[in-house]
Image: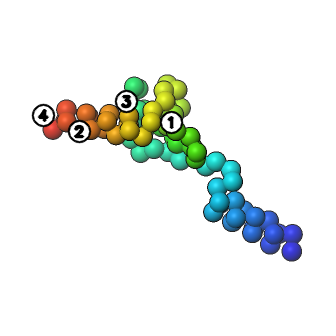
């Protein structure tokens, strides 16, 4: 029964996100071009683990739009 309760608690924590999760952001860092951006639950900023720069989602979207505009030209 102890193992079953442990499994149940892991499932509940995974669904409710009691502990913040970290996920990679699939775009390069606008500052250093490394694919090292990560986002953490409940955080406003995405952080580059290489150069330690911080970006909001809007800032990353603007950087991506600028990159696409330069590549299209």
**Element assignment for label 2:** helix
**Looking at the rendered structure, which numbered label has been put on residue 73?**
4
Alpha carbon separation for disc pair 3 and 2 = 13 Å
Alpha carbon separation for disc pair 1 and 3 = 14 Å
Depth check, mark 1 against mark 4: the one in front is 1
Name the N-terminal-most of marks 2 and 4.
2
**Element assignment for label 3:** loop
Alpha carbon separation for disc pair 4 and 3 = 19 Å
**Element assignment for label 1:** loop
For this orientation, the residue located farthest to the left is 73
Image quadrant where one finds the C terminus:
top left
**Looking at the rendered structure, which numbered label has been put on residue 34?**
none
Q: Tell me, yes or no, whether the two marked residues, 4 and 3, touch with CB atoms within 8 Å.
A: no
Q: Position of residue 60 (x, y in %)?
A: 38, 37
Alpha carbon separation for disc pair 1 and 2 = 22 Å
Q: For mark 2, what is the residue?
A: 68
For this orientation, the residue located farthest to the right is 2
Q: For mark 3, what is the residue?
A: 30
Q: Tell me, yes or no, whether the two marked residues, 3 and 2, touch with CB atoms within 8 Å.
A: no
Alpha carbon separation for disc pair 1 and 4 = 30 Å
């Amino acid at each position: 029964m102890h193992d079953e309760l442990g499994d149940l608690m892991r499932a509940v924590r995974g669904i409710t996100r009691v502990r913040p999760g970290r996920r990679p952001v699939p775009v390069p860092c606008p500052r250093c071009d490394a694919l090292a951006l990560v986002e953490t639950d409940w955080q406003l900023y995405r952080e580059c683990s290489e150069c330690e720069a911080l970006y909001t989602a809007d800032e990353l979207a603007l950087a991506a739009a600028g990159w696409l505009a330069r590549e299209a030209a």
